[in-house]
Image (tube, helix red, strand yellow):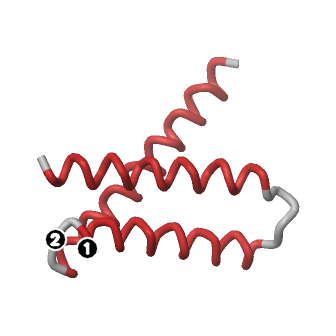
Amino acid sequence: MKGLVVISLQNIIYSSFLVVEMLSQQDRLYAKTLLFIVFLYLAFFIAGAYGYTTKKALKMTMGSVTIFFLFQQICHWVFTFIS
């Protein structure tokens, strides 16, 4: 149950990253990369704050960010194909 809460919170963080990225379209690539690293660290910190070991928190964070952005790409491809 604890893992589900952590993954849900991390997905909220990644969604907020997408909103911030959309609002900062004119920023350069290194600014967006730095912003991504900050949001990724925040997601890792939340996993660690829920009592997971560093290794487990890192695995959970990398897994959830991978699944989130893969799902985002799949949705983008589907909506591009439909329209």
42 to the left or right of 78:
left
User: Which quarter of the figure is the C terminus placed in?
Assistant: top right
Quarter assignment of residue 44: bottom left
Which residue is farthest left? Answer: 1
Which residue type does callout 1 highlight?
Gly
What's the mark number on residue 48? 1
Instruction: Say few, some or many: other residues with alpha carbon within 10 Å of mark 2 (under 14 / 14 to 19 / 20 or more).
Output: few
Quarter assignment of residue 65: bottom left
Which residue is farthest top? Answer: 82
32 to the left or right of 79:
right
* Nearest the eye: 28 or 48: 48
**Residue 52 in picture, x, y percent from top left:** 16, 71
- Classify mark 2: helix, strand or loop: loop
**Residue 37 in picture, x, y percent from top left:** 54, 75
Q: Is 32 placed above or below 21 here?
A: below
Q: Residue at x 52, y 67 (%)?
A: 39
Residue holding disc 2: 51
Please say if the residues under marks 1 and 2 sit with CB atoms less than 8 Å apart: no
Q: Is 21 placed above or below 54 here?
A: above
Which residue type does callout 2 highlight?
Gly
Instruction: Say few, some or many: other residues with alpha carbon within 10 Å of mark 1 (under 14 / 14 to 19 / 20 or more).
Output: some
**Residue 5 in picture, x, y percent from top left:** 24, 48
Gap between marks 1 and 2, in whole Å? Answer: 5 Å
Q: Is 43 placed above or below 70 here?
A: below
* Nearest the eye: 3 or 64: 3
- Classify mark 1: helix, strand or loop: helix
12 to the left or right of 4:
right
Q: Residue at x 28, y 74 (%)?
A: 58
